[in-house]
Amino acid sequence: MSLNFHYRCIDCGREYQIEPGIMLCPDCEKTRKPDEPLKGVLEVVAEGKADGSITGRNTTGSIEDFVFQFLPVEKEYFPSIPVGNTPLWQPELLRRKTDFEKLFLKDDTLNPTGSFKDRASYLVAAFARKHGIGEVTVASTGNAASSMAGVGAASGLKVRIFIPATAPKAKMVQALQYGAEVNLVDGSYDIAFDMSIDYTKKHGGLNRNTAYNPMTIEGKKTVSLELYAQLGDVPEYMFVPTGDGVILSGVFKGFKDLLSLGIIDKMPTVYSVQAEGSSAICRALSTGSFGKPLPSKTIADSIAVDVPRGGYYALRSLKEFGGRCITVSDDEILAAQHELASNAGLFAEPASSAAYAGFLKASRSLPRDSKVVLLITGSGLKDIEAAMKGVKLP
Ligand SMILES: *Cc1c(COP(=O)(O)O)cnc(C)c1O
């Protein structure tokens, strides 16, 4: 009872063996126009039989083992830092306040570096170790950098990051503390992205850029596998904060694996929540395509992107599985951040609070007794400056 894995290009369908020399489908990569999401993104396809039972459900060991069988790198290569298996809990007061008695919080702020990004870094680190690669490079708005730095430190990997000089200080300091080599970029994340790819093309090592490295989507899918194990089923609705669309893609991918392997028979309704000032994926869902990019502007730095790198996979998944998109304003995000912190005791960064803001907006049209999961992706301590805007200082 085990699965076999290979890559399949999401654009042309060509299949490839999983190996470090390939990140995007070489033919389709070239068809990308400037200012477009990445083309030729490779999806990991799992074939064979998986064990759908979660014996002793809710115990750490069994959930981990349940999840590991779906991953394309063997358990022995993963570092010992405890990533994932985050709490799914029932916020009593928030349930009362919102009148949703089956509201759940999936608290990924409790990952080792304080964000969901650890799920991708964990698989990337294991992949590097399996293939004897000692250095990982990544471009980031902040969290992917601090995450790769931390998980890399625990894995004995050298980590180099490219990060906009405007990134929140905490995220940069975290990366420095973990011992990463930090390159500040005088420009946007989009520029940092291209610089980091140039760097790995010239100097070698593994590039962890989101959507570009297939292990990023694949690592992020673990959240859906865990949710299935924790709930004993999939939720009816799920709210996912979205920038590049790779967390969203990962969420879909996890459920898709469960569907295609016959473990579940229904996909949850997944809401992608974007900031009004950075809503490329929502715009593409309503217009049918990614037009000219607009400069992003939102307080939620982790979901501020001009060109969503994982846009095509995200859009395709939204269309295929009846996903929905919703946008929220910065004021709604800040209000949601404070409400979440003061009613649930969960202090989340603005990007993550967008999930709650999106839920509040959509909740009018959802049945009150539905099982709803909010994906809380990053800790509020990562961006104190933004959080200060939502409270009155004494
Ligand atoms: C990266 C990130 C997101 C968005 O993920 P994408 O894959 O870019 O859509 C949301 N919240 C937090 C805290 C993040 O770090």
Image: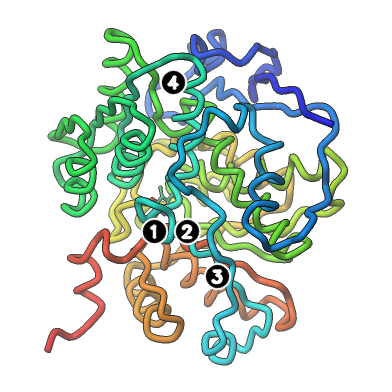
Position of residue 110 relative to residue 2, above or below, is below
Which residue: 61% across, 67% down?
373
Residue type, mark 1 in image: Gly
What number of labels is visible?
4
Tell me if mark 4 has few (under 14), some (14-19) or many (20+) residues whose alpha carbon lies within 10 angstroms of its own. few
Give how far apart the Cα atoms at labels 1 and 3 are.
12 Å
The residue that mark 2 highlights is 108
- The C terminus lies in which quarter of the figure? bottom left
Image: 319 above or below 352:
above
Left or right placement of residue 385 versus residue 214 in this view: left
Q: Position of residue 147 (x, y in %)?
A: 35, 43
Are the two marked residues, 1 and 3, in contact with CB atoms closer than 8 angstroms?
A: no
Q: Work out whether mark 4 precedes mark 3 in sequence or the reverse, and give the earlier one.
A: 4
Marks 1 and 2 sit apart, C-alpha to C-alpha, by 6 Å
Residue at numbered disc 4: 33
- For label 1, count other residues whose C-alpha is less than 10 Å away and answer few (under 14), some (14-19) or many (20+): many
Query: Going 67% across and 54% down the picture, which residue do you hit?
Result: 323
Q: Nearer the viewer, residue 289 or 188?
A: 188
Q: Position of residue 198 (x, y in %)?
A: 29, 15
Q: Nearer the viewer, mark 4 or mark 3?
A: 3
Disc 2 secondary structure class? helix
67 or 385, which is in the foreground? 67
Between marks 4 and 2, how big is the CA–CA gap?
Answer: 35 Å
